[in-house]
Image: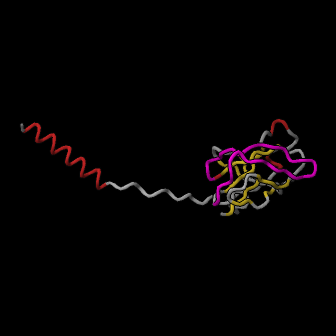
């Protein structure tokens, strides 16, 4: 009988502990600084080319911008450790528009990477940017407006 009381007491203590536990508050997204405009980024020489994104708003499903014609680019979410939205080429007019795989998230920072340096005349050293571990060389970025 004492064994049964000990088991019931143990269950009671476990229930009290579970009842007193509260879920942790959700983590707020940490702001991601603009890696290209970061003044701490080392620059060996002035870049030959630049890429820029047009303003992006939360919920947008198309990202556009400009850069050198023929450049293969990859658009990623830097706030989501490089989640890939998609890839495209900059057109002969120097513009690009990419349909996103998912709508842009307000407050996150989008980045543009050189998609396939081996298949193009462009070299990573042709651009100002910052090499971010697990993501790659970010040559442009834009904060998504909420």
Q: Which residues are magenta?
A: 79-106
Q: Nearer the viewer, residue 38 or 5?
A: 5
Dividing the picture into quadrants, the one containing residue 89 is top right
Work out whether 72 lies above or below 44: above
Side of 10 where 80 appears, left or right: right
Q: 146 or 70, which lies in front?
A: 146
Tell me residue 141's x, y (percent): 73, 56
Q: Residue furthest right?
A: 92
In the picture, residue 119 is in which quadrant? top right
**Quadrant of the frame with the N terminus:** top left
> Residue 102: percent from the left, percent from the top?
68, 48
> Along the line of sight, which residue is nearer the eye, 54 or 35?
54
The residue lying at 72 percent from left, 52 percent from top is 111
Q: Is residue 42 above or below residue 74?
A: below
Percent x, y of residue 52 = 80, 57
Task: Name which residue lies at 77% across and 53% down.
Answer: 63
Q: Depth check: 32 or 25 in front?
A: 25
* Residue 102 among magenta residues: yes
In this figure, which colouring scheme has been used for the structure?
secondary structure
Residue 146 lies in the magenta stretch:
no
Q: Position of residue 128 (x, y in %)?
A: 78, 54
Residue 22 located left or right of residue 46? left
Q: Quadrant of the C terminus?
A: bottom right
Q: How many marks?
A: 0
Residue for point 15% across, 45% down: 9
Q: Residue at 63% x, 60% y: name it.
A: 107
């Amino acid at each position: 009988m004492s064994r049964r009381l000990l088991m019931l007491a143990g269950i009671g203590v476990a229930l009290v502990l579970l009842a007193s536990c509260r879920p942790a508050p959700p983590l707020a997204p940490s702001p991601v600084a603009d890696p290209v405009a970061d003044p701490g980024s080392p620059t060996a020489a002035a870049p030959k080319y630049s890429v820029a994104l047009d303003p992006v708003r939360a919920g947008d499903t198309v990202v556009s911008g400009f850069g050198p014609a023929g450049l293969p680019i990859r658009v990623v979410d830097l706030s989501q450790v490089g989640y890939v939205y998609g890839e495209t080429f900059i057109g002969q007019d120097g513009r690009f528009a990419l349909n996103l795989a998912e709508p842009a998230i307000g407050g996150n920072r989008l980045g543009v990477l050189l998609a396939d340096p081996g298949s193009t005349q462009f070299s990573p050293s042709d651009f100002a940017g910052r090499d971010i571990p697990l993501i790659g060389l970010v040559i442009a970025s834009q904060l998504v407006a909420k």
